[in-house]
Structure formats: C-alpha cells, structure tokens
Amino acid sequence: SVGQGSLVTLLFFDIRVLRPACSIKQTLAAAYTTRLLLPVVFVVVFSFWFFASLHLHRILKRFPVFRIEDLCHSVGSVLIGLYISVVSACMLLLDCRTSPNDKKVVRTIPFAECSGPEYDAMIPVFVMAALVYLPGIAGLVSYALFVAPSQYTSPRFRVAI
C-alpha cells in the first residue's frame, strides 16, 4: 500500500516508491521512460473519467457530466502544478555526477552510466521529450493566458472551482 509520504514521492515522479525493480529490469530506458510517461498517465486518467462520466450520467441522471472544458482545466492544473517535476524528469539525462568508482552516472539513476550505447540510445527520447513537454506545456499556458481576456465572458471558458 502507498502511504501519504509515498504519494507525495510519487507525485514528484520518483516511482521507486512502487518498488518496480522486482518486475521491471533496471535499465536506463525503463527508468527514464517511466518518468516521462507519468504526465501521459494523468491525461489518460482524466480522459477515462471524462468518458466514464458520460456513461454514468446516462445511467444515473444525478451523476454530473465531466465536460471537455473540465478535462482541459483539470489536466492543465495538474501539469502547471507539476511543471518543475516534468522538466526535472525530462532533463534527467543531463544531470551526471562522478560515482565512487570514478564513473560518470546519472544522478538519480546511479546504475546508469552517462556514456555508452544505452545512454546514447536514449538521446533521441530526450530530444523528443524536450521538444514536446517543455515548450508544449509552456505554450498551452501562454495560449490560455492570451485568450483569457477575450473569452472570460464565455461560460464554456470559465470553470468554477
């Protein structure tokens, strides 16, 4: 079971709290991509809830419908709140240190060396993540701030909290 302290650790993209080492082979690819996929998990969960709420509303009329605007607001709120963690997970490959055995290793993945074929194979993943996550999230926030003054009167744009 995951306690409160473990949940906070999980929110900062440290999946070691789930103890995946027993089921997932410890490789740089597995450690890096699982951290990069956590924002995608949020999008999938909120999207699932969107479609589930539509079906539940048909069955139970009192059940509220999760509108697409609510989905965008929820995902946006989570991604803004976790932006620094997303950037940290994305830039993980660039954070190397010298280990006690004089090898350069990734700071938060000490079994992964900062050179060699496994590290080089992750460079395209790093470039894609950096091109999608970093300007993508910042661009969405900038767009929302840009259109907010003109769309403020629209009930579809405003979300009551």
Image (cartoon, rainbow, N blue to C red):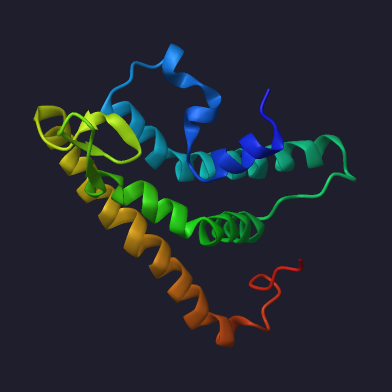
Q: Is residue 1 left or right of residue 123?
A: right
The mark tally for this picture is: 0
Q: Is residue 124 depicted above or below 158 in this figure?
A: above
Can you tell which quarter of the image residue 37 is in? top left
Q: Is residue 161 depicted above or below 89 in this figure?
A: below
Q: Where is residue 42 in the image (x, y as percent from the top left)?
A: 54, 43
Whether residue 23 is visible: no
Q: Where is residue 27 in the image (x, y as percent from the top left)?
A: 28, 23
Q: Is residue 24 left or right of residue 114?
A: right
Q: Out of 44 and 14, give the one closest to the viewer.
A: 14
Q: Out of 119 and 142, give the one closest to the viewer.
A: 119
Identify the residue at image location x=23%, y=49%. Answer: 94
Q: In this view, does 78 lie to the left or right of 84?
A: right
Identify the residue at image location x=33%, y=27%. Answer: 30
Among all residues in the image, which is located at the extreme right?
62
Can you tell which quarter of the image residue 139 is in? bottom left
Q: Position of residue 85 (x, y in %)?
A: 45, 52
Identify the residue at image location x=45%, y=74%. Answer: 143
Among all residues in the image, which is located at the extreme bottom?
149
Which quarter of the figure is the N terminus placed in? top right
Q: Is residue 72 left or right of residue 84?
A: right
Q: Position of residue 105 (x, y in %)?
A: 22, 36
Among all residues in the image, which is located at the extreme top?
22
Can you tell which quarter of the image residue 122 is in? top left
Among all residues in the image, which is located at the extreme left?
116
Q: Is residue 27 depicted above or below 128 in this figure?
A: above
Whether residue 64 is visible: yes
Which quarter of the figure is the C terminus placed in? bottom right
Identify the residue at image location x=56%, y=87%. Answer: 150
